[in-house]
Amino acid sequence: MNFTARIALVGDRSDAVRSHNRIPGLLEALRLRDGLDLDAYWIPTEEAGRGLEGFDAVWVLPGSPYRSEAGAVAAIHTAREHGIPFLGTCGGFQHALLEFARNVCGLDRAGHTENDPATGDEDALIVPLSCSLVGHEGAVRIAPGSRAAQLIGTERMQARYHCSFGLNPERLAVLRAHGLLVTGTDEAGEARIAELPDHPFFLATLFQPELDGDGTRVHPLIRGLATAATDHAAAR
């Protein structure tokens, strides 16, 4: 039996964001090519702080700075705490790390310097990249045996980016100490994929897998989220 899964697309929808324009085609490709039917709801960040418990997946999309940092972080918190399949891409990656740092690692003041440029050095979790990745592609090395490696089927891939902010390398150790796995890095070893091993599906990427290819074949990480969502719907 096929189950229709409800997915919350969290982000401030805009025609100016290329990844947002890709979403309808990706959902249709998942339905036609993979037999995965997702009932998608766009949730603005101002409205994402409540009511997501009934969804089968949460995808926090690019488009930061969001209108509500608190709403994006709350959506991620709901997915993590309730075992709801989660994918965060670009800004979703950045805010997933914020949520984890604040609510798991006890770094209550962890900040994002794009959202708040006045964030002090001691609290800066998300900081400007040494080199902007807006419009760039780059190689990502994937940890063997990780969920990302299982889904992608390789330990090295090319990824598309549209961002200028990433994880402060000085904060990586504390995130790892509390259970976050960095399972994808660039050639310099900086974080590009993060996941939680004890969650049904919790994965975040600094790159934008929704921009992969021509949009007719869905990136394996997005297909993985869709599969996890339908499994969640079936379990309900």
Image: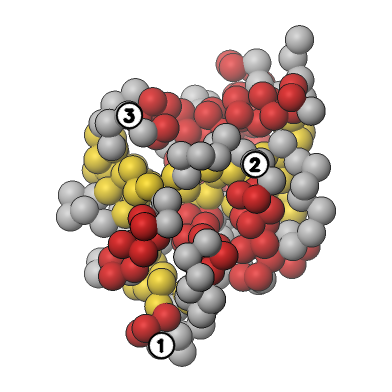
Q: Which image quadrant: the C terminus?
A: top right
Q: Nearer the viewer, residue 113 or 159?
A: 113
In the picture, measured across the screen, residue 182 lies left or right of residue 216, that is left
> Residue tagged by mark 1?
120
- Which amino acid lies under the numbered mark 2 shown in the image of this protein? Gly
Question: Where is 171 relative to 18, above or below?
Answer: below
Q: Earlier in the sequence, mark 3 or mark 2?
A: 2
Q: Measure the C-alpha gap from mark 1 to mark 2.
A: 33 Å
Q: Nearer the viewer, residue 192 or 201?
A: 201
- Which amino acid lies under the numbered mark 3 shown in the image of this protein? Gly
The quarter holding residue 11 reads bottom right
The residue depicted at 46 percent of the width and 89 percent of the height is 118
> Residue tagged by mark 2?
83
The quarter holding residue 47 reads bottom right
- Which amino acid lies under the numbered mark 1 shown in the image of this protein? Gly
Residue 64 visible:
no
Q: Nearer the viewer, residue 174 or 21?
A: 174
> Residue tagged by mark 3?
145
Can you give x and y, in whole percent of width and height, for residue 113 in the image? 44, 78
Mark 2 Cα shell of 10 Å, populated few (<14), some (14-19), many (≥20): some
Can you give x and y, in whole percent of width and height, for residue 213 in the image? 42, 32
Question: Where is 225 relative to 134, above or below?
Answer: above
> Disc 1 vs disc 2: Cβ atoms closer than 8 Å?
no
Question: Is label 1 or label 3 in front?
Answer: 3
The residue depicted at 28 percent of the width and 66 percent of the height is 169
